[in-house]
Amino acid sequence: MMKLFYSPGACSLASHIALIETGAPFELVKVPVADRSNWRPEYLAINPRGFIPALEVNGHVMSENAAIMLYLAHTHPAARLLPAEPGALARALEWLAWQSNTAHPVFAHLWRPERFVDTAEEKEMVKKAAVSRVKAVASEVETWLQRNDYAAGPLFSIADGMFLVLYRWMWRAGETVNEETFPAWTRYVLRLRERPSVQQALATEQVSLFP
Ligand SMILES: N[C@@H](CCC(=O)N[C@@H](CS)C(=O)NCC(=O)O)C(=O)O
């Protein structure tokens, strides 16, 4: 059975949602990053990089949300987790790459500056720079969703889970996110919340979409 290593409300929520969407049976293993469980030897034996998520399938472990979700989409075609049309498929992959190489690192700089620099002064500078980049990331998502229902365009795909995660991270970072400040993004997360997979993942992880 597939086994997902996750931390409540972390980026692993995107893989969790995709996993439920497949309809396949799976097990969840909680590795809370809040208490640094992900750096314990037991977890490093599973994913030597120490990050969550990781997905174990028949003894084989894969990491990185994009890789995990692509694997799930390909092994469960009936779940239609990726668009067939090449332009929309490229768009889904574009957002998956951007989520990993641009959006996620902004929050890593904000919440874990010690990963990048050493002194207290440097950490403050890194955090300060991240605050303005958070706003740039958010405005990119809002602009896209003003013209498109989902990340890939008209249909739900594996590129949507992380937009939902980022929405939560916005208010967790102290930003005001609501119908007034980010109307399209807010309507979008309300639409995603209608999916049973999203409801189940949020309930299991015991996290909410709004403050
Ligand atoms: N690009 C990776 C990012 C993984 C990542 O940074 N995960 C965070 C949680 S959202 C983590 O494990 N943080 C633990 C730490 O920094 O100690 C992915 O998309 O899977």
Image (cartoon, rainbow, N blue to C red):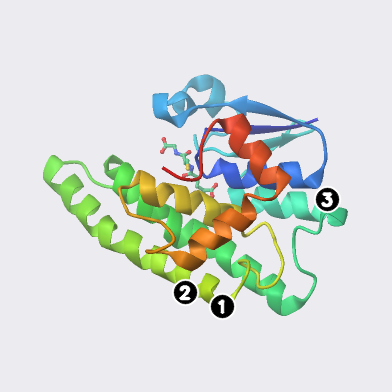
Label drawn at residue 143: 2
Q: Residue 93: name its quadrant.
A: bottom right
Q: Residue at x 78, y 76 (%)?
A: 85
Residue at the left extreme of this rendering: 121
| 126 on left or right of 102 | left
Viewer-side residue, 57 vs 208 = 208
Viewer-side residue, 185 vs 77 = 185
Label drawn at residue 147: 1
The image shows residue 98 at horizontal and vertical percentages of: 50, 64
Q: Residue at x 23, y 46 (%)?
A: 117
**Three-letter code for the amino acid on which mark 2 is drawn:** Thr
Q: Quadrant of the N terminus?
A: top right
Callout 1 touching callout 2 (CB < 8 Å): yes
Q: Between label 2 and label 3, give the one nearer the viewer.
A: 2
Q: Residue at x 60, y 47 (%)?
A: 14
The image shows residue 75 at horizontal and vertical percentages of: 83, 50
Q: Quadrant of the C terminus?
A: top left
The image shows residue 57 at horizontal and vertical percentages of: 76, 36
Residue at the front extreme of this rendering: 180
CA gap between label 1 and label 2 equals: 7 Å
Marks 3 and 1, the one that precedes in the sequence: 3
**Three-letter code for the amino acid on which mark 3 is drawn:** Thr
CA gap between label 2 and label 3 equals: 32 Å
Circle 2: is it few (<14), some (14-19), or many (20+) Cα within 10 Å?
A: few
| 112 on left or right of 37 | left
Q: Between label 3 and label 1, give the one nearer the viewer.
A: 1
Placement of 172 over or under 178, stated as above or below: above
Find disc 3 in the rendering and name its residue: 75
Q: Residue 132: name its quadrant.
A: bottom left
Callout 3 touching callout 1 (CB < 8 Å): no
